[in-house]
Image: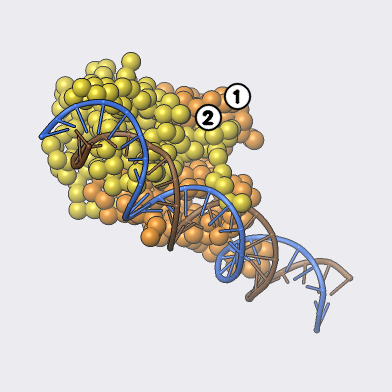
Chain colours: A orange, B yellow, C brown, D blue
Amino acid sequence: MSRRITWADAVCPIARAADVLGEPWTLLILRNATAGTTRFEDFRAQLGIADNVLTTRLAKLVDRGLLTKLPYRDGGRTRHEYRLTQAGSDALPVLHALGTWGHAHTSSEAGPTTLVHTRCGQATRPGAKCDACGKPLARTDLAWRGSWLDEGEIPLADPVG
Amino acid sequence: MSRRITWADAVCPIARAADVLGEPWTLLILRNATAGTTRFEDFRAQLGIADNVLTTRLAKLVDRGLLTKLPYRDGGRTRHEYRLTQAGSDALPVLHALGTWGHAHTSSEAGPTTLVHTRCGQATRPGAKCDACGKPLARTDLAWRGSWLDEGEIPLADPVG
DNA sequence: CATCTGACTTGCTCGTTGCAAGCCAGCTAC
DNA sequence: GTAGCTGGCTTGCAACGAGCAAGTCAGATG
């Protein structure tokens, strides 16, 4: 028997978080969702993930409340998009910590990817206030900036609600 | 062919970090290493992980520079222990972000697990200075505190120098 | 010598991933 | 009409990886 162990009921909050976020692809799906991706086909194309795996990952993320599935109009027909919930957007500190660690301790030609407060233009950590200018940090005033990013800067997606 | 994709050479630092830290068990191994576990047998017993998986995970963590394998004397014979390196101890913000998210967005009877600055006794985020008292944060003055923890408080392991 | 312990390694089985193909609804082209 | 396209899945297959059990090996201990 090789059933994958679940840490969903662990006492340790790190283990419970790892139960969802620690699965392969999940962190990258969340990264792209945070960067604004909402549609199945876009996740598939951007990540190169297999369809069936994407289906199960998205379902688990919806089940755990990180994403929500909403209908939208495409042309004249109804489709569905996956939007970040509050819980999903709250994973930003996890992504930020991973990015910081990855930049510091893994090798790459690329420069850092930073989180910037677009109102003051300076880098900051996620939190209540901007590390640089001290003003309250609104989610809508945050963007990822990196030389390797296509447009140079990517605004963060807002949670639904 | 179903060989697991590697993100070790990705441009995105989040993907490179996820390549190591996103594997099953790895985050929990790192959590326990941060809490002071150093020996194979102890990791095995505490986590309930299969031997062969633990072997490969520890080897990858050593290979990626998060842990280092050091000889030590046990009775009169030489054994090996796995100690955190600087890179390994720098993963603390990742664990902290996961723990915070896990406490906020997964259900459990247990209370929060916080990172405390033992000099002032207050909770803080990892960083250069204590969020509560403002003094510089030394690794040796940090501990995890949670009602579910055996001793109530666990000091963080220091990296080898 | 036999036994014990820690740290692995090997073998087996089954779940999961990757890949390819198929399906289905609704729109567009002819 | 019907043929095709597109997005979002589902299904089938082969290979990898996790869980489990058992075996190995070195050095201490009885």
Image quarter in which the N terminus of chain A is found: bottom left
- Which is in the foreground here, disc 2 or disc 1? 1
Point 17% across, 44% down: residue: B148
- The x, y position of residue A26, in whole percent, is 47, 48
Q: Quadrant of residue B88?
A: top left
Q: Are marks 2 and 1 on the same chain?
A: yes
- The x, y position of residue B50, in whole percent, is 34, 47
- The x, y position of residue B36, in whole percent, is 24, 30
Helix, strand or loop status at disc 2 = loop
Tag 2: amino acid: Thr
Q: Nearer the viewer, residue C22 or B126?
A: C22
Read off the residue under disc 2: A113
In this picture, residue A107 sits left or right of residue B139: right
Residue A65 vs B41, above or below: the answer is below
Subunit ID for the residue under disc 1: A
Judge whether residue B153 can be spotted in this image: yes
Helix, strand or loop status at disc 1 = loop
Residue A7 vs B99, above or below: the answer is below
Point 53% across, 56% down: residue: A53
| Badge count | 2
Assess disc 1: are there few (<14), some (14-19) or many (≥20) residues with their C-alpha within 10 Å of its C-alpha.
few
Read off the residue under disc 1: A109
